[in-house]
Image: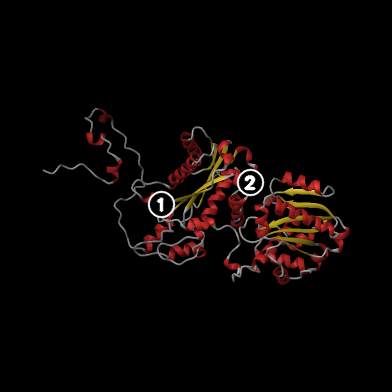
Amino acid sequence: MTIKSLQELKDFIKSKDNVRNFINCSDVPDICKTEPCMLGVDEAGRGPVLGPMVYGIAYCPVDQTKILHTLGCADSKALTEEKRDDIFTKMLTEEDSLNNVGWVAEVISPNYISNSMYRRAKHSLNEVSMNSAISLIKKAAESGANITEVYVDTVGPPEKYQAKLAEIFPNYKITVAKKADSIYPIVSAASIVAKVTRDHALKVWQFLEGLEMAHTEFGSGYPGELKDFIKSKDNVRNFINCSDVPDICKTEPCMLGVDEAGRGPVLGPMVYGIAYCPVDQTKILHTLGCADSKALTEEKRDDIFTKMLTEEDSLNNVGWVAEVISPNYISNSMYRRAKHSLNEVSMNSAISLIKKAAESGANITEVYVDTVGPPEKYQAKLAEIFPNYKITVAKKADSIYPIVSAASIVAKVTRDHALKVWQFLEGLEMAHTEFGSGYPGDPLTKKFIREQIDNVFGYPMLVRFSWSTAEHMLQEKAATCTFEEVDDQGSTKKPKKSISSFFAKPDEEKARKRHKFFEERHLTVSNPFE
């Protein structure tokens, strides 16, 4: 059956038994039977706990790559679902595409994946993936396409995968690369084929068990355990979430990265994250795609973190810990008598997480930290606490050291999901989409700060009362409060002593340093009762 629209794609998928794998493909364009062709391979749905994984290939003549640019083939992770559907529809309907671009998709059922990984002669997900890619390349060639070049988005180490494919297809020029869909348009086209097919497979999923449930009720299929874990916690208090320590990390020297998410927002928690792995296994971080987390989309960060939770290489080599620091704790720290600045809160969290990793059995030898304040002072402080570790503190460390990027991804994903499942103890019924990112410049956050204010109690616990944004609004709209102590922001320099003071009788009251407990509470010695 030749598919000519997205509706026909849905109908085709719906006609299939979703317990078994099946293949869908275009006709082979005549030009592809005679002209040398390039072929791209990519997948969709490798990480989710629900639904199929789909492998897709696309191919076209080597000298007709302009058609891919005209279609808009680019990094599919950066495209919206609507845009991917639009590009795939053009591939199905527009004359230039029909005459130049062929494609094949294999839908690999969740049942098949589970059986492969549980059977006696186990097949890893990498093997399932590679076998699908190989079979699709063979199918294109057997259908008459004149394939000469193959470009593949890697599964595992690219060098090993490339060597395997080169052995099977000695007459093809083989290129296997990380993030190939953002480098080679033909791989982008394959990725779009795979993603659109998977999206619509979920939309028309029929439960053989008789369940009546729309796809909108079970989501994208990506693991929700993180959300459930966060939801089970009291969001007024800090809490920690962590992985198991991989066995290799207990014996091999390990590097550890530290970074945070949510330091600046007026809403929500700040999260500190660490990640660690053996010093000689940093390639796993590159394979995962750990890079400057600020340059990654939320979807991409979720994808990387999902791989850290599910893929064998990650589970065996990478450990992580995240501390969720509640907005209530941050405000209390900055407002209490013996004030703790945000820098102190941050440093204390980082130090405690490094200690936790070591106490859990990880053999830490190197620590890389994204700085808080002047890096030299922070590095000196950490070096004093951890004299046996090689300490490196740097600005923008998450864009320099992949292990810090991994820590940053742990922190950012945790904070994102903490906001998504935030439960208002004050009884507010409000989705996270209604209060925004939490940053003061976000229009939704501004609206929340303006409108969700109580004359007496101020704001819900989601808000950091100690932020100037909140303070100013409270001063303007809430009841006026008088505090026992006015914070003196002036100079704390001691007055200079005069020469005569060295010859005067010592002032015993001034000389005696009282305990901080009494000073903070303004307690003084009084005459005893008679």
- Considering the numbered disc 2 on the image, is that residue within a helix, a strand or a loop? helix
Q: Residues within 10 Å of mark 2 (few under 14, many from 20)?
A: some
Q: Quadrant of residue 459?
A: bottom left
The residues bearing labels 2 and 1 have C-alpha atoms spaced at a distance of 36 Å
How many circles with numbers are drawn on the protein?
A: 2
Q: Quadrant of residue 84?
A: bottom right
User: Seen in the image, is 254 located left or right of residue 494?
Assistant: right
Q: Earlier in the sequence, mark 2 or mark 1?
A: 2
Q: Which mark is residue 329?
A: 1
94 or 105: nearer the viewer: 105
Q: Is the N terminus in the top left, top right, bottom left or bottom right quadrant?
A: bottom right
Where is residue 519 shown, x and y percent of the image? 28, 43
Q: Which mark is residue 445?
A: none
Q: Which amino acid is tagged 2?
A: Asp
Q: Residue at x 55, y 54 (%)?
A: 413
- Considering the numbered disc 1 on the image, is that residue within a helix, a strand or a loop? helix
Outermost residue toward the left in this view: 530
Q: Quadrant of residue 327?
A: bottom left
Q: Residue at x 22, y 43 (%)?
A: 524
Q: Could one spot residue 219 in this view of the protein? A: yes
Residue under pointer 2: 313
Q: Could one spot residue 60 in this view of the protein? A: no
Where is residue 397 shown, x and y percent of the image? 57, 43
Outermost residue toward the right in this view: 34
* Vertical order, 495 against 261 (above or below): above
472 or 323: nearer the viewer: 323
* Vertical order, 54 against 245 (above or below): below
483 or 113: nearer the viewer: 113
Where is residue 458 shown, x and y percent of the image? 37, 61
Q: Which amino acid is tagged 1?
A: Tyr
Q: Residues within 10 Å of mark 1 (few under 14, many from 20)?
A: some
